[in-house]
Image: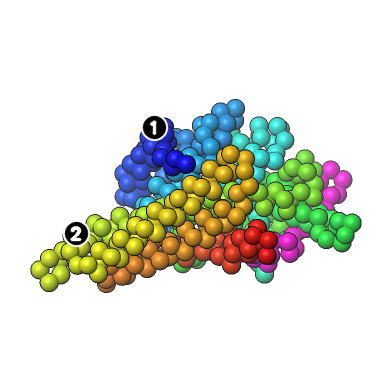
Amino acid sequence: MDFRLTEEQEALRESVRDFAREVVAPVIAEHYEKHTFPYEVVRQMGKMGLFGLPFSEEYGGMGGNYFTLCLALEELARVDSSVAITLEAAISLGAMPIYRFGTEEQKAQWLPKLISGEALAGFGLTEPGVGSDAGGTQTRAVLDGDEWVINGSKAFITNSGTDITTLVTVTAVTGTRPDGSKELSTIIVPSGTPGFTVAPAYSKVGWNASDTHELTFDDCRVPAGNLLGERGRGFAQFLRILDEGRIAIAALAVGLAQGCVDESLKYARERHAFGQPIGNYQAIQFKIADMEMRAHTARLAYYDAAARMLAGEPFKRQAAIAKLHASTIAVDNAREATQIHGGYGFMNEYPVARFWRDSKILEIGEGTSEVQRMIIARDLGL
């Protein structure tokens, strides 16, 4: 095994790292404080081709793969997670379902703008009162002639209400299987469709510069041709999308954890106490050493999961392990980085305060830590 990056991968990582430091870092604190979406940053990410990283050139992509996306997410999250999750959700939850399961007509209609970053898309899976039990979906879609009529609601949907959001892909009950279970399908709902309402943005603990809304569908009608993939395959489709997305979230979590190391090293060298830099004290050295250890091992976990996925091997367990471990250590590193900064760590002007607030959702979104443990245990045969 060789986890060293190729020259092309290293060049991408350096490019995104410079972008994060030079473009994102100077503006993100203000967006975070005001809860505004960083359109100017998104536009520049589009020009860099970041939204097209894992997609083929046929649809305007960069011809890379999912691992290159993960590298970019890690570098963005070292500076800010709101920008990183905007990119992650735009690709893995927004464009990827259409890329994986769409017809050629659907791909031609939607992918070019999504891949260029000119438009964003959301993935409507989670519902109020359902949460991790995706099989308990209550939203329904009934075929009426040549139209689907959708009724229901979705919660916590990223990239669903920006000025450039063009669609959401919605999971809905479309019938009953012979065994009595729900038939779940996935349907594309363009923004602005009558009966499709986007609620005001949530007031969140973290990710304050990302876009998150509740969605409602009240006799919302879309063409029958907006069915994404095969009818009744919605459950299998979103399980595949979530398995892949967990690797991406692990990469994002590693980036946050590494960002905590970056900021703690900087502060430990600059802050003096009792006549010397606090980095000279073994208590601080050990904290930072442990933080670096956590980030390194979590990085190896997501590298391994991505390698298995790209090789066409089973990767569900490894993706769950990577997501579980990386999200856990991100919270640990954020806590320790805040402690190292002392009182300043509690001030929003310091990045570690933002990291602390952003870290917790990593143990919840894309499958809670408890769900990851369930996946691991089941894959072990328990």
Q: In which image quadrant can residue 11 be found?
A: top left
Percent of width and height locating residue 361: 50, 63
Q: Residue at x 84, y 49 (%)?
A: 143
Percent of width and height locating residue 71: 44, 44
The answer to whether residue 210 is left or right of residue 225 is left
Residue in front for this viewpoint, 253 or 172? 253
Q: Amino acid at mark 2?
A: Arg
In the rendered image, which residue does mark 1 sit on? 7
The stretch of residues the image draws in magenta is 130-151
Of the residues tagged 2 and 1, which is closer to the observer?
1
Scheme by which the image is coloured = rainbow
Label 2 Cα neighbours within 10 Å, binned few <14 / some 14-19 / many ≥20: few
Residue in front for this viewpoint, 122 or 367? 367
Q: Amino acid at mark 1?
A: Glu
Mark linked to residue 269: 2
Q: Residue at x 45, y 47 (%)?
A: 73
Asked if residue 258 shows in the view, the reply is: yes
| Measured Cα–Cα span from mark 2 to mark 1 | 32 Å
Q: Earlier in the sequence, mark 2 or mark 1?
A: 1
Label 1 Cα neighbours within 10 Å, binned few <14 / some 14-19 / many ≥20: few
The image quadrant where one finds the C terminus is: bottom right
Asked if residue 19 shows in the view, the reply is: no
